[in-house]
Image (cartoon, rainbow, N blue to C red):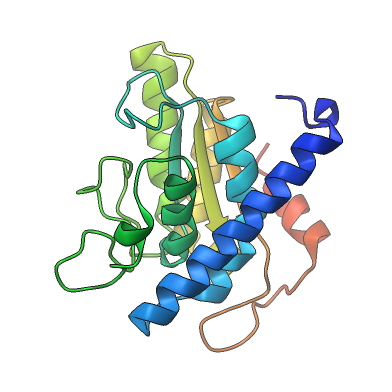
Amino acid sequence: MDALAVDQKTVQELKDIANKLRVHSIRSTSIANSGHPTSSCSAAEILSVLFFNAMKYDPNDPRDPKSDRFVMSKGHACPALYGAWLEAGHITVEDLMTLRKIDSDLEGHPTPRLDFIDVGTGSLGQGLSCAAGMAYTAKYFDKSSYRVYCLMGDGESCEGSVWEAMHFASYYKLDNLVAILDVNRLGQSEATSLGHQFTVYKQRFEAFG
């Protein structure tokens, strides 16, 4: 959908959903006494727009082969992703509040045991490679129109595999792949090396074509 065509009512609805995703993230990680609420909160607007304005999918049938695919490369921010599926009606608040419990499938990182997760992304820097492979399959094997969305963190962009995946996507002209970088300047123990230098990230992405 053309973002310029979105009316103000829709914009406000998406903002409201984003705030709900933040609430879900903070509540669930607080109850778990574990997790990454800040990384989850920084992705709230992105997930709101993707899940409730951009992606094609059936919340009642996440494995529908016609659905767009989503890879949460910054897997530690999955509380916000779980919150999106809650708002879509696929899981319940009670489910979400089991986050990180020993007998819960809502782990601290996404697991494909869940029917709405295609890729396990505990290891940072791997998501874009997986997403590129999925997009390649869609374009050249399945001959399908579904798109593959990949949400990455700026911290994981220091991994060489990210840039190898960029080259792969460019070389094979994967115009069905959407890579989104959440630049929040937050690393595990210190600020990321580029901080909020959006222009530098943009130039690096564009360098791969």
39 lies above or below 20: below
49 lies above or below 101: above
- The answer to whether residue 140 is left or right of residue 204 is left
Q: Quadrant of the N terminus?
A: top right
Quadrant for residue 52, please give it.
Answer: top right
- The answer to whether residue 206 is left or right of residue 152 is right
Which residue is more in the foreground, 78 or 30? Answer: 30
Residue lying furthest left:
103
Horizontal and vertical percent position of residue 77? 47, 64
Horizontal and vertical percent position of residue 71? 43, 45
Residue at position x 63%, y 65% in the image:
42
Residue at position x 42%, y 24% in the image:
67
109 lies above or below 64: below
Which residue is more in the foreground, 193 or 164? Answer: 193
Which residue is more in the foreground, 143 or 47? Answer: 47
Residue at position x 80%, y 30% in the image:
6
Horizontal and vertical percent position of residue 36? 47, 75
Residue at position x 33%, y 69% in the image:
108
